[in-house]
Amino acid sequence: MVRIKICGVTSSEDARRAADAGADAIGLNFYNKSSRCVTPQQAAAVVRALPAFTVAVGVFVGTPLRQVCAVAYQLGLRGVQTYDDQPPGEDTFPFAHVPSFRVKDATGLEHVRRFVDAATALGRAPTAVLIDSYVEGQMGGTGHRAPWELLRGFDPGVPVVLAGGLTPENVAEAIATVRPWAVDVASGVERAPGVKDPERMLRFVQNARSAPAPPAT
Ligand SMILES: O=C(O)c1ccccc1N[C@@H]1O[C@H](COP(=O)(O)O)[C@@H](O)[C@H]1O
């Protein structure tokens, strides 16, 4: 069954609704240029509101490893989603690590493969890789689709999380095309920037669950 992360949750109400809708994970965005950015204090309230079996993942852009780890420990995050081009240097992330890539063409996918190979050779294979669309000057949360056709059959050696422009309307087709391990959505289930729409979250989860199962991992 495909895993589902609803990203950019900014309130306890939205966290509970995402969990009630059936999401496996919610994302807390600490990137200060995002309309979905939360402070660690706001994030703590959101994490407290989650039921026991729904995990929280932190989204960090350009944040030093030490700071990422401090926030993740403090909040009890299950995973960290990062946007750095290099595998973590000296230390292994003591969390599920999901490096994220904005991909526009085959060269971009080759870069992902090389990243995973290099990290694996160092004994630091990521838990999964997230593939998003490439939009000049923006790191994520763009509402633009990733190149699904290019991603058909893409196997970097670790599970793939598909993100970028997913909606309740297109998620089943995206899963059927790419067969990702998980899907991740931010803007596609919002009614305003940073505010989730309960009905869209529910339909997103239902439609994702009705799509063909991804390969077993
Ligand atoms: O959501 C953001 O504002 C954001 C900012 C910087 C990095 C990542 C961000 N979000 C991630 O982007 C994907 C795709 O977003 P969308 O569904 O196309 O709106 C989202 O799932 C987050 O993981």
Image (spheres, rainbow, N blue to C red):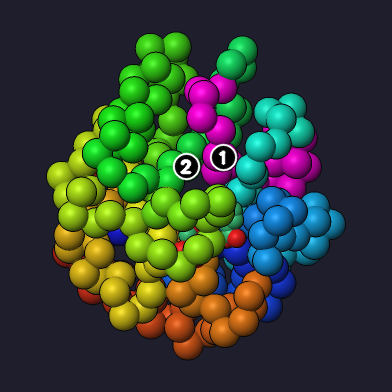
Which residue bears the numbered disc 2? Answer: 100
List x then y, in percent, for residue 107.
Answer: 29, 34
At 33% across and 37% down in the image, what residue appears? 108
Magenta stretch contains residue 74:
yes
Can the viewer see residue 5 in this picture? no
Residue at image point 46% right, 74% down? 188
Q: Is mark 2 within 8 Å of ligand 1?
A: yes
**Residue farthest along the bottom direction in this orientation:** 199
Which element is circle 1 on? strand
The quarter of the displayed image where residue 153 is located: top left
Q: Secondary structure at mark 2?
A: strand
The amino acid at mark 2 is: Ser
Residue under numbered circle 1: 82
Q: Is residue 102 left or right of residue 49?
A: left
Category of crowding for the residue at label 2, using alpha-carbon neighbours closer than 10 angstroms: few (below 14), some (14–19), many (at least 20): many
Q: Is residue 99 above or below residue 10?
A: above
Percent position of residue 199, x then y? 47, 87
Q: Pointers 2 and 1 in contact (CB under 8 A)? A: yes
In the rendered structure, which segment of residues is drawn in magenta?
Answer: 68-88
Q: CA distance from mark 2 to mark 1?
A: 6 Å
Seen at 48% across and 37% down, the residue is 99
